[in-house]
Image (cartoon, rainbow, N blue to C red):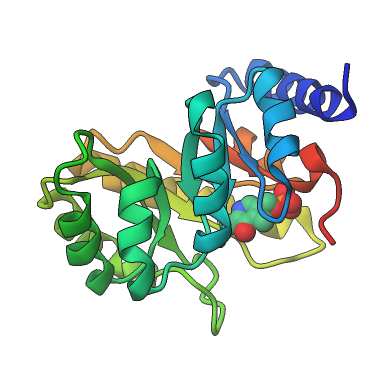
Amino acid sequence: MRPQSQALQQVLQTLENVAAACERPVARLLAVSKTKPPEAIRALAEAGQRAFGENYVQEAVEKIRLLKPLGLEWHLIGHLQSNKCRDVAEHFDWVESLDRARLVEPLNRFREGHGRPLDVLIQVNPDGEAGKSGCDPAQIDALAALVAQSPNLRLRGLMAIPEPSEDREVRRQTFRRLRGWFDQLRASYPQADTLSMGMSDDYDLAASEGATEVRIGSALFGARD
Ligand SMILES: *Cc1c(COP(=O)(O)O)cnc(C)c1O
C-alpha cells in the first residue's frame, strides 16, 4: 500500500471508532488536496476516496480538468471572491464557503444549464474572529433563505473552522455551538444534511460532536510546504 492510502485507512478507522463510541453515523471524509499535485489525488482516488476539497480556484480548476476522467467530487473550501463565482459555478460540485449575500446571485446565474444544482454550505465564523471568513451566526437565517430560493443552488448546511486553541475543550464548545445552529437550520430546511467541521488535529472531536463531514489535509497527504 502507498503511504497515502495507509493514512486514509487510519483516518477512516478513527472515524469508525468515534462513530461506534458515540452511536452516530460515520462522518464522511473530504480530502483536502490544496497545494498537492494531481498524482497525490490520483493515489487517494485509487484507494477509494471520491470527495476532494480545494482552496484556490485557479489551482483547483486545473486539477479538476486534468482529473475529469476519474469522476471525482470537488468542494471549494477556501475564501470565495466575487470575481471567481463563474469558475466555481462551472467546475465545482459544492461550495462550502458561501459567507455573504452578494455571492448568491452570481453563483446561481452561472450555474444555470449545468444540469445539477450547486450544493452549498454557509460558512460561519463561530468564534467571532476578526478578519476571518464566515458570516456572523446571526446572519445564517437570512443567507439560508437567499440560497434556498435560488433554483440552481441547493442548501446543504453549514461549514466552520473554530478559533485555533490548544485547549481541546474550548474547541469542543465551539463544535457544540455549531451543532446547535445546524439543528436550528434543519428545523426550517430539512434538506440541510451536512455539518462540515473538524480538520487533521481535531476531526475525532468534531465527529463526536456531530460533524457529518470532516475536512482533512495534512493527516492524509503529509504537511504542506
Ligand atoms: C486547509 C484546510 C483544511 C485542512 O487542514 P489540515 O489541518 O491540513 O487537515 C480544512 N478546512 C479548510 C477550510 C482548510 O482551508
Is residue 58 rendered to the left or right of residue 118? Answer: right
Is residue 209 rendered to the left or right of residue 10? Answer: left
Front residue of this view, candidates 194 and 83: 83
Residue at 21% x, 56% y is 110
Residue at 28% x, 47% y is 185
Location of residue 25 in the rendering, given as x and y in whole percent from the top left corner: 53, 19
Front residue of this view, candidates 209 and 214: 214
Dividing the picture into quadrants, the one containing residue 113 is top left
Is residue 151 rendered to the left or right of residue 144? Answer: left
Residue at 68% x, 41% y is 38
Compared to residue 65, the image places residue 16 above or below, namely: above
Compared to residue 119, the image places residue 43 above or below, namely: above
Tag count: 0
On-image quarter of the C terminus: bottom right
Dividing the picture into quadrants, the one containing residue 94 is top left
Residue sticking out furthest to the bottom = 130
Location of residue 177 in the rendering, given as x and y in whole percent from the top left corner: 49, 54
On-image quarter of the N terminus: top right
Displayed-image quarter of ligand 1: bottom right
